[in-house]
Amino acid sequence: MEPPSLGQHLPAANVVLFLIQLAVAIGVFLFAPEGSWSPSKAHDSNAIASSGALDSSGSLALVPAASPTASTLTPNNPLAPPAYVFYIWVPIYVFTGITVITDRFYPTYSFYLTSDDPSFLRQWFQLACLANMSWVALDMWFSWVHMATFALTVLWCTMLPLYLFVVRHPTPRYSQAWIYYFCSEFSVRLYFGWLSADVIFSIADVMQYLHGGYFGFSVYAMLLGALLVLAFGTYVHGRDPVVGLVVTWALLGLIFKHATFPGDAQEVFNKLRAVAIVVAPVFPILVFIDSVRYVYVVHWKTSRVPSSSNEYYKPFVFETTAEQFQPLQSGAPLYGDKPVDYGTTHA
């Protein structure tokens, strides 16, 4: 009997590593130093609440008089949504936990097994867990905004191979496809979508810290535009609505954010809110239109075909090259039932 290979232990190792990651996040939330994570631990909670300052992690950034750490000296970020938007981490961790449990105990529904090299993807997930723990410690415990942004960028890069795989290998078309989708690959889409938004917020934090003040509208519009381009790209080329809906969630937070900024920064913030009001409905409308079209073509139009008819409807995505180029039967004419006359019958 051969000993189990290293790849066979990776699903169990991923479960353990994810539990450690979850414990680190909860531990930082409960026992972080004063003023680095929880708003209730701040030195002057009233001043902080009135300022509306937020850092990239979703915790309230302290005013410079509170504590001389890197992230607390960061000016208020006009792009960062309010704190409640960052509760999206709760479903991210929940669905990620479901993914690792599915991969360990119900591998039939795991997207890893659809890969030619499942161990390669599982190792990327392990790197993502390590990068997540590093980012949580640097950003929420030590409040090192530069190193935290670097760790967050590394985390985004480790999730990129997993995301590219799930969008390039669609959900298998069997009767329980929804189990495969929500118990396996949905967490990757949700995780990657929010990391993309979080990276943009963190870059804005670092730029403001280095600049020592606010930028003009064009700089924030460029950062927001980069996020929107990514969301549209994943929807158009990857047929993935999750990233776009996550970006919509961040835009809704920006729309309903109440904050006061000094000088021209308030006008910049109002312009950003106006852009968010215009763009926020786009992705939900696109998803609704595509959903209605899918129901019409795949379900309603198919049900209208008589049962005795040999014709049937199916979306173009199910058409394979084998169906396009079927071999001819021996002795069968090329076109219809009538043989082709090449002009030799009267020669």
Image (cartoon, grey):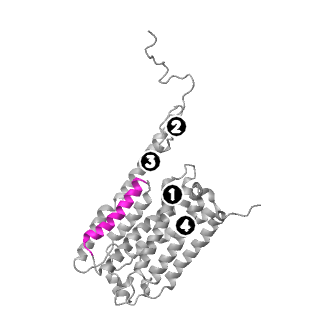
Q: Which residue is mark 4?
A: 125
SS under mark 2: helix
Q: Which mark is residue 294?
A: 3
- Does the magenta run of residues contain 230? yes
Depth check, front residue: 25 or 121: 121
Quick check: marks 2 and 3 in contact, CB under 8 Å?
no
The quadrant of the picture occupied by the N terminus is: bottom right
SS under mark 3: helix
Q: Nearer the viewer, mark 3 or mark 1?
A: 1
User: In whole angstroms, how far apart are the C-alphas of marks 2 and 3?
Assistant: 22 Å
| Magenta-drawn segment | 215-237
The quadrant of the picture occupied by the C terminus is: top left
Depth check, front residue: 166 or 47: 166
Q: Amino acid at mark 1?
A: Phe
Q: Amino acid at mark 3?
A: Tyr
Snapshot quadrant of residue 278: bottom left
Q: Which residue is mark 1?
A: 165
Q: Residue at x 46, y 70 (%)?
A: 154
User: In whole angstroms, how far apart are the C-alphas of marks 3 and 1?
Assistant: 23 Å
SS under mark 4: helix
Q: Main secondary structure of the magenta part?
A: helix
Q: Which mark is residue 323?
A: 2
User: In whole angstroms, how far apart are the C-alphas of marks 4 and 1?
Assistant: 12 Å
N-term mark: 1 or 2: 1
Quick check: marks 2 and 4 in contact, CB under 8 Å?
no
